[in-house]
């Protein structure tokens, strides 16, 4: 009999001793972990095991496990927030589950019921409530991961897999408020391409980006701006989606982000920004290809207004400059405040999304757990 993943079969094993909490001011992203983890095994013969919340600990795998050799691994990232009334909130977790399933399918890892998995994750979060910081800007980062554990050196689909979820308390991306970033528009490396895996959240997309990131950092830049094709199309900023606000050649104020053509990750924050912008109905919103020559021309003509990246970790990341083919391109921030590290539209997106995430702005995207 092949078993499906079911929340009602969830079991809980508690640790004998709980860890000491870390003061919020000392949190480092992804370095501290909570007391428990969710563990669900899968096999081609039997399907999914009963979900188990167990004490956080090491995982033992055979050296021949396929995850080590052929990158059978995908993951997700979402956050739990605590509002001013002490309620735990999630932000659009259904989108994370849909993307998790899509990533798994892309690399032939087993399918699962996303709604059932989400209910298991909610139970884990409730158990870890004491780890959710109460300060605004702080949260509990949740990392679901699915790996192929088949003991084989053959390149084939895996007959064994492990789905686990760990949690880490994290602070705000910008400790002292916004900090605009400088980008190196890389023409030497390509992050992804149509028909590849750029739209899947898999580990194999991330490791190859580390060397270019280190190279950019050595040259004084915070992130890479990933370009693609002969026309130098914008794709992503580091591990973030990319947005450009400009006056187009028709005189329209336009917010542009690259389309989901298979090389762009379908970010939850990206989708949220697009939805908010369309609901405001204050400027044109476009998912279309945009090239660096178009951005350069807009800057030269005084039509470039703002640029920013978006993602779960930072919400939005203002961009103040880009080095592109020997040219330093200055990106405007706030025309009314020379000391500002973010433009008014960038800041408005950040404030609105934070308000929704912490329950200060009522919205269907914010899901209450308790």
Image (spheres, grey):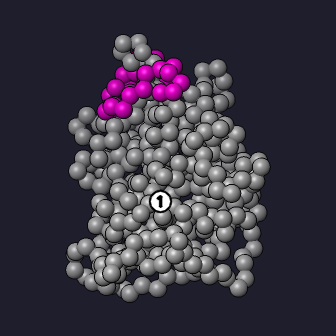
Which quadrant holds residue 180? Answer: top right
Q: Name the residue located 33 percent from the left edge and 31 percent from the top edge.
A: 288
Q: Which residues are magenta?
A: 278-306
Which quadrant holds residue 230? Answer: top left
Q: Depth check: 117 or 134 in front?
A: 117
Q: Depth check: 35 or 336 in front?
A: 35
Q: Name the residue located 25 percent from the left edge and 73 percent from the top edge.
A: 157
Q: Name the residue located 36 percent from the left edge and 36 percent from the top edge.
A: 258
Above or below residue 15? Residue 352 is above
Say which quadrant the C terminus sits in. Answer: bottom right
Q: Can you give x and y, in whole percent of width and height, for residue 83 in the image?
A: 72, 49
Label 1: how many Cα within 10 Å (few below 14, some 14–19, many 20+)? some
Q: Is residue 202 visible?
A: no
- Tell whether position 293 is magenta: yes
**Residue underneath mark 1:** 115
Above or below residue 34? Residue 183 is above
Above or below residue 51? Residue 213 is above
User: In this image, 210 relative to 282: left or right?
Assistant: left
- Tell whether position 235 is magenta: no
Q: Depth check: 31 or 271 in front?
A: 271
């Amino acid at each position: 009999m092949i078993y499906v993943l079911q929340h009602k079969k969830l079991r809980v094993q508690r640790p004998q001793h709980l860890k000491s909490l870390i003061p919020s001011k000392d949190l480092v992203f992804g370095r501290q972990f909570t007391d428990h983890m969710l563990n669900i095994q899968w096999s081609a013969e039997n399907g999914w095991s009963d979900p188990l919340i167990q004490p956080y600990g090491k995982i033992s795998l055979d050296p021949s496990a396929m995850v080590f050799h052929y990158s059978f691994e995908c993951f997700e990232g979402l956050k739990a927030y605590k509002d001013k009334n002490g309620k735990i909130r999630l932000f659009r977790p259904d989108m994370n589950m849909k993307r998790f399933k899509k990533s798994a399918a892309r690399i032939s890892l087993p399918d699962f019921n996303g709604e059932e998995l989400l209910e298991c994750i909610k139970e884990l979060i409730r158990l870890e409530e004491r780890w959710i910081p109460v300060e605004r800007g702080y949260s509990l980062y949740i990392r679901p991961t699915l790996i192929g554990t088949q003991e084989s050196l053959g390149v084939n689909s895996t007959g064994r897999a492990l789905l686990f979820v760990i949690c880490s308390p994290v602070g705000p991306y910008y400790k002292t408020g916004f900090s605009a970033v400088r980008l190196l528009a890389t023409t030497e490396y390509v992050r992804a391409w149509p028909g590849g895996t750029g739209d899947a959240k898999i580990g194999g997309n991330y490791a190859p980006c580390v060397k270019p990131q280190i190279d950019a950092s050595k040259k004084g830049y915070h992130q890479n701006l990933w370009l693609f094709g002969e026309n130098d199309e914008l794709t992503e900023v580091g591990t973030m989606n990319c947005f450009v606000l400009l006056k187009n050649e028709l005189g329209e104020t336009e917010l542009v982000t690259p389309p989901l053509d298979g090389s762009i990750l379908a970010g939850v924050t990206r989708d949220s920004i697009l939805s908010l912008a369309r609901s405001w109905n204050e400027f044109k919103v476009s998912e279309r290809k945009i090239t660096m020559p178009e951005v350069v021309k807009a800057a030269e003509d005084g039509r470039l207004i703002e640029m920013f990246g978006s993602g779960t970790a930072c919400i939005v990341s203002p961009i103040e400059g880009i080095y592109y083919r020997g040219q330093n391109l200055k990106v405007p921030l706030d025309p009314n405040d020379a000391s500002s590290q973010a433009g008014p539209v960038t800041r408005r997106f950040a404030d609105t999304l934070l308000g929704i995430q912490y329950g200060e702005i009522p919205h269907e995207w914010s899901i209450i757990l308790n």
